[in-house]
Image: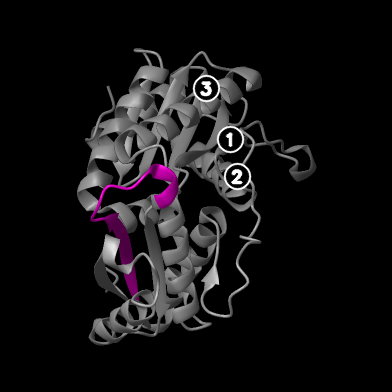
Amino acid sequence: MVVSDKISVIQQLQDACRSDEGLLMLINLDSFELFNDVYGHDMGDIMLEKCAEIIGECCEDSDIKGCLGGDEFVVFCRGLLDKGAFARLAAEINSRISAAAKDLIGVDMKILLGASIGGVFVPEHGRIYEELFHKADMALEYIKQTGNHGCAYYNKSDDEERIDGLETISKTMDEGNHYKGALWLDYDYFSIVYKYVRRYIQTYKGVASKVLITIEPTVEMSMEDFAEASKAFGKVVNHTLRKSDIMMQSRTNQYFVLLPEMTDRYIEKVRSRIMYQWEDTDYFDVTDIKFEADTIVAQDED
């Protein structure tokens, strides 16, 4: 079981690092902020509970498992001193998180939810929990910067540091997009840009709007015909938006759009332009379009 009491977990971890051998492991979910924004915080909360359950099941009962808050977890795996075993454990956690997300949202989910995991071996690299935590965090940051969805372990020599993890998904842009509208990215690239925009807003007190657009059939259609309708709608959305806007296809029938420097007062204009263009297509009378919008603003820091 993953313990949610942070103070209790840290005390257990400090004691274990002083007396036991094993692996201190930090786990951070990849693309979870984007998952929350696209599919909603209720789905996010369910997914966090599922991730805690997966971590608890993948690790031994005698291991110390805790939640540090949000989408960050910490585990002390007693007796785990083998780098290969660490890689296999990380792969299992990633595989099960990805499968659980698809079970929750659907197999057409476009956001690949997984975990970046940083580890440090005890007592090879020390006995003091705070110092070990920092080293594991360095390994975690390394895997975050080199692709996500995998693991890295701390090594004293930078040139000896290795990555033992899952292969990352293809990071190619959508070559089928020849329009001059919004920047249409696959979900992996979109996640990178999205995080950058969020940091930019927080640093420079900017603003942006996020819009989830869903297309649904209003008459009986084959899966192939509806897929074509969804594809055609994506092209309309892309062609209608500004060059400074960013979009991705979050599901077969959903598009997630990021509109920098645009507040919610302008969303109706965006919606009207999209629907005006959609009216000229053969699919207008047989589909229903839903828009869900919210504004991203800088948060006050404590």
Please give the label number shown on residue 89.
3
Q: Mark 1 or mark 2: which comes first in sequence?
A: 2
State how far apart marks 2 and 3 are (Cα). Answer: 15 Å
Which amino acid does the dot numbered 2 rest on? Ile
The reply to whether the C-beta atoms of the residues labelled 1 and 2 are less than 8 Å apart is yes
Q: Which of the two residues, 257 or 55, is positioned nearer the viewer here? A: 257
Q: Nearer the viewer, residue 252 or 192?
A: 252
Q: Which residue is mark 2?
A: 143
Residue at 77% across, 37% down: 160
Q: Is residue 278 above or below residue 218?
A: below
Tell me if residue 202 comes above or below residue 116 in the rendering: below
Image quarter in which the N terminus is found: top left
Give the amino acid at mark 1.
Cys
Q: Find disc 1 in the rendering and name its residue.
A: 151
Say left or right for 254 vs 141: left
Q: Position of residue 56 (x, y in %)?
A: 34, 22
